[in-house]
Structure formats: structure tokens, C-alpha cells
Image (cartoon, helix red, strand yellow):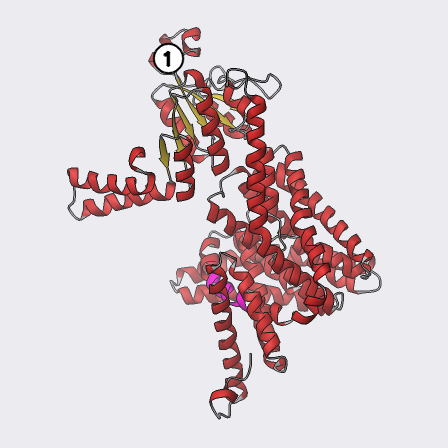
Amino acid sequence: MPDLSAYAFDLELTEQLRFILQLGGTVAAALVSGAILLRLRQPAIVGYLLAGIAIGALSPENAGEENRIAVLADVGVVLLLFALGVEFSIRELREIRHVALPGGVVQIAIVLGVGAIVMVVLGHELREALVIGACLSISSTLVVIKTLLDRGETDSLHGRAAIGWSIVQDIATILFIVALPPLAGADFIGPLVIALVKAAIFLVLAYVLGTRLLPLGFAYVARLGSNELFLLAVVATALLTAFASSALFGLSLALGAFVAGLLVSESDLSYQAAAEVIPFRDLFAVLFFVSVGMLLDPVALLDDLPTIALLVGLAVVGKGAVIALLGWWRRLPVRSALLLGAGMSQVGEFSFILAENGLDLGILSAQAYNLILGTAVVSILVSPLAQGAATHLATRLEARRDHQAQGHDGRYAPDPDTGPQVQPPRPGMAGTSRTEQLLTQEADAHRPAVVVLGGGHVGGVVVKAVRNRGFRVVVVDRDPRRLEELSKTGAATLFGDAANPAILARCGLDHANVLVIAVGDPLSARLATERALRINPRLMIAARARGQHSVVDLRDVGARRIADPDAEAAFELARHALQRMGVSGPELTAIVTGLRRDVYGRDRV
């Protein structure tokens, strides 16, 4: 930051006051820049980087203060990786292991290799090229998750795959961090083996001590009932474990912090630990992103624009295409694979950590560091354009598929090669009502049914409710375990993509009473609605939506009943509050009906 006291006040500031002014100015600059970027519908992280670039350009002489900011930024890295470890979910990775694990590993290898080859061809040293390739292979977890939340797609097929894919990339980041110090030496193999051995010893000791001592310590502090002491225990664990990994084992601070987070995640108090550390993590992480921007040279960046454009193409178009192809290879529907690739098509925050470590170790030159940072900023800015293009392309492809699947009468012709037939429940596993026991098998097959698309939490509740009254249910999902569980209720099951025209044609929609669309993907819900109404124009469709845009979209294509989980929660809480205040009867019903009309429209209440 410039020396503000020289412009307005003739003050003799002590070293401590100058640093406080520097720190306050840095945070204020990040606040203003982040707010501007959010108003422009861009990630705040880009604003923090731009604030750092501006500070570095305006105050190149204040290296001492910037070094102090960099020390605080190291704390941000520690807390960032610690929080990642606390929030790390083996269960989430297990649920999509067939897609994310092999796909993520292959994608990282391909992008790293291609990126390194391109940089070697451009004249960069092999070690430097490998680090740049590794940075290109990692997407932004923050951007991916924020985008999924904003679009209401966290429960969608591509959303769950993207979260798992991000976890695989985060693990790869830790491995890259371990490999950086050996890469800095002349002999790579020997130091790498030694580093891996040290890492293994550190992990074993951390696991033994962490699983036996940490739970006892956290439980004791928690019983004291002081939030401040619990916060101190969490932060001390993160910082001291990071220190031990670096000072005693020669590993990175980031690795130690991540391991500390993993150990805390095994505790029953992991959620409280995460809640306590998140505000401090966010503050220090902002300082980290600002400090990264301070090291970037805007003038050199302009000189390297052609190279940055090439790297952005690799990170956005190249990596996005690779991920989409790998998602399709792992049997995702084409539209889900396209949305997955677009959502992961940027360079993220953990690449900054790799780049900074590479710069400190002398592996990266200042020019290469500039290239990585410039590529990351531009890729994050253009990522929404890639997602819009992917959505448009997916819609075009699905419309073309619709045209090819329709017969001469405008209905969908079932394709015998698209997948298995509807599977009835296994004998002896399905509960039946007295009414069902009186029906013949032939009568049961032609009985009007409820068709449920999506067997997750929402769809599963619907299936169980309908089966409890003895009505016939057909449920469609891509998860065999969900179908196996729901078949125990007596539901007929069909494995496949809920929006696939041939799958919909097999569900018996022509004589169904109700279609419930419980999938979490707005695009799949809209396609399923359109295609179901082509099969049976009189079908009553109840669909799950997320956000006003999704509500309007489903309403326009013909869904008769729409449920937004957030809106429904608001209606129920408002009803409860009004009841407690003495409002009841017709007045309460009218108020809630008005609220529902505001969200869903007059003809959908």
C-alpha cells in the first residue's frame, strides 16, 4: 500500500503503526475490490487478486510490509488446508468413486502432461513446465462449489460428480506439494523417495497421536464450555502440526495443516471445529490471495498475453473437454458430462499455493509465476461463459436426440438396446397391502401408477409414502444401491437416466396418474417434463425446483405442481410463526396461499 500518511498528515509513524496501516489498507482494498466483483457476478477471489495486483503496482517500495503480509498469508494457507482436511469426506468420494476417482486421476495426468509438453516447446525448463502443467490440472474448488450452489445443482448428477472430482484434485495437490522440494534438487528420484518416507513417518505418528490424544483434548476443552478456548485448541492444533511437518520432517506447512484437519475430522467435534475456524480461515485466506496478487507484474503480464491466451485455452477448453469425455466414458449422460466439464474448466486457489511454493523453491521463475496467476484469473473470469456454452450445447444435443427418438406419430419409440426393462421387486421382499393381494398379476400390471424420477432423499420419501398406501410405483435412478433399497418397499425399479426418452417410454407413463420429478438437475427436470408430456399430454407432473429461475422454467414447459425446498421451508416456518401469534383458520390459509402464489404463480398454487 502507498504511505497514506505522506499525503494528508505529517505524522511520524512507528514501525508497528505503519504495519497496522498496511494491514488495514490491504483488508480494505480487498473489501472494495471483492464487493465490485460480486456486483459484476464474478467470484470475490478475483477481486482479492486484483487488489493485490493494484497494491503491488502502487507500492513497489514497501517490501518489508508486504513480507509481513506474506507471513500472515502463510497462516491463511495453513487454515485453508486445515479446513479442507476437516471438511474432507471419504463418504462423498466413495459415493461417486466410479466416476470421480478414475476420471480425476486420468484427467490430472493428461492435462499435466500436455501442459508440460506445451511449455517445454515454448522454451521453459522441464521442472518449471511440470509445475505449470500441475497448476493447470487443478480446478478451483471454491468456484465449483459456489457455482453449484448458485445454480441449485449440488444434488444433480454432474454436481455430485464435480464435488468428488474436486476432492480427487485436492488430494493430488497435497501429493504435488510433497513432490516440490525434491523437484527443486538436481537428483529428483532420491529426494522424492526420502520425502515420501518422511511423509509416511509423519502420517503414522500424526495418526497415532492424533487419534488417541486429540479427541481426549478436544473433549476436555469442550466440556469447559468456552468457545474461545475451543477455538484456541483448534488453531493451535493446525499451526503446531504444520510447524512439525515443516521443521521436523522437511515437508510443507500445507501438508501438515491438511493432515491436522483430517485428524480433527475423525472427532465427534469436527463440525464445531470447522465452524470455529472458518471466519479466521476466510480472513487469512483473503490475505493470502492479496499477497499472491502483490507478486504479479502487470507489465510483464501484458508482454506474455499470447502465452496466457494459450494456457487459458488449455485450462478452459482443453481441460473442460477432457473432463467431459472422461465423464461420458464413466457412463454419465452426455448433458451431465458437458456440464461437468464446463464447471471444472478453470484454474483454482490451490494452484496459487503450488505456484508460490515453486517460486520460493526456485523451480519457477518470476515470468512463470506471472503466467500461472494470469491464467488463473482469466480462466475464472471466462468460466461462466464456458458453462453457458455447455448448457446451450447440451440443450441442442438433447433436442436433436428428441427429434431422432420420435416416431411418425410424434411419440417416443422404445429402443430395445437402451437398457434393461422395468424390474419388479424381488419375491418375498416387497410389502403389499390387502388390496394388492386381491389383484391378479395382469390387473396389477395395468393399474395406474405413480412414476418417480430420482431415488435420492426426496424421491425415496415419495416412494415410501405412496407404497404405504399400497399404490403401484415405478422409480427410475442411476444408482443400483438406491434401487435395491427402494425395491424392498415393493416399488418397481428401472435403472437409467431419468431424462432419457427411451427410459421414459418404458415407465408406463401412458397409463400413469402422476409423474414426480425428484432429480436435482434443473436441465434434466425440464427435459423429463417436456418428454413425459409428449408421451402423455394429460399427465399430472409434480417437479422439484431450486430457485426462481428453475420454477419459471418448469412452469413454462408444463409442470402442474412445483416444489422449491427453500420456499417450502419458508412457507412452513411462516405458518408456524403466525400460528404462535394467534393467526389461524381461513386467514392463515389465505396468507400462505398468497406466499405460494408469489413464488409459483397463480395457476400453480
**What residue span does the magenta drawing correspond to?**
277-287
Above or below: residue 76 compared with residue 16: above
Mark 1, other Cα within 10 Å: few <14 / some 14–19 / many ≥20: some
Q: Quadrant of the N terminus?
A: bottom right
Q: Quadrant of the C terminus?
A: top left
Residue 243 x/y as whole percent: 62, 68
Residue 380, can we see it? yes
Residue 47 x/y as whole percent: 53, 64
Residue labelled with disc 1: 436
Question: On the picture, is 574 further left or further right than 282?
Answer: left
- Determine the image quadrant of residue 102: top right
Please name the residue shown 78% across and 64% down the image. Answer: 184
- Most foreground residue, 292 or 38: 38
- Most foreground residue, 226 or 212: 226
- Most foreground residue, 501 or 241: 501
Q: Is residue 282 magenta?
A: yes
Residue 103 x/y as whole percent: 66, 41
Residue 259 x/y as whole percent: 60, 57
- Determine the image quadrant of residue 222: bottom left
Question: On the picture, is 343 further left or further right than 491?
Answer: right
- For the residue marked with disc 1, what is the amino acid? Glu
Label the magenta part by its dominant secondary structure: helix
- Which residue is farthest right? 187
- Determine the image quadrant of residue 177: bottom right
**What secondary structure is found at the residue carrying circle 1?**
helix
Residue 251, can we see it? no
Question: On the picture, is 597 further left or further right than 256?
Answer: left
Above or below: residue 509 compared with residue 588: above
